Image (cartoon, rainbow, N blue to C red):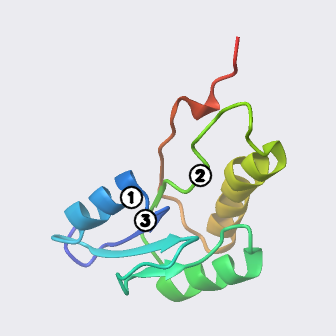
Amino acid sequence: MHHKTKILITGANGYLGNCLYNFFKKKYHVVGIDLKNNFNKKIYKCNILNVKKFNSFLEKTKPKIIIHLAAQSLVDETINKKRYYLNNVIATKNLINAMKENNLNNLIFSSTAALYKYK
């Protein structure tokens, strides 16, 4: 990869997303999306559940690599299961479908113990 390679980071305002954003911006063209606004103008407010907006964003930015970190990571008894399912499962399916529609093939998916079931 050379310095012109564009990387999109989903969940770019989270701890890991922000660390990776700052690490990669030294060598690559990095853009990020997150549900929340941030002081960083290269991190855009975009919800992956909004298929039309997200697809449009991918069309405009044309990233070479997507690092998918957007998720709802806290798991406890009080969690809203529907919101958890939408933000983790449906959002990731939307991401994959949008990648196919935009002919994008390079995805790095990171996850946490939040994927494991309780025993």
In the rendered image, which quarter is residue 95 located in?
A: bottom right
The residue type indicated by label 2 comes to Ala
Residue 62 shows which numbered tag? none
Of the two numbered discs 3 and 2 on the same chain, state the one appearing first in sequence: 3
Q: Describe residue 70's horizontal placement relative to residue 5 as left or right.
A: right
Q: Position of residue 117 (x, y in %)?
A: 69, 21
Q: Position of residue 3 (x, y in %)?
A: 19, 74
The answer to whether 62 is drawn above or below residue 35 in the figure is below
The residue type indicated by label 3 comes to Ala
Q: Residues within 10 Å of mark 2 (few under 14, many from 20)?
A: many
Q: Regarding mark 3 in the picture, which secondary structure is present there?
A: loop
Alpha-carbon distance for marks 3 and 2? 11 Å
Residue located 54% across and 89% down the image: 60
Residue 71 shows which numbered tag? 2
Question: Which residue is farthest right?
Answer: 82
Residue annotated with mark 3: 12
Q: Position of residue 98 (x, y in %)?
A: 67, 69
Residue 17 shows which numbered tag? 1
Residue located 66% across and 54% down the image: 92
The answer to whether 101 is drawn above or below residue 110 in the figure is below
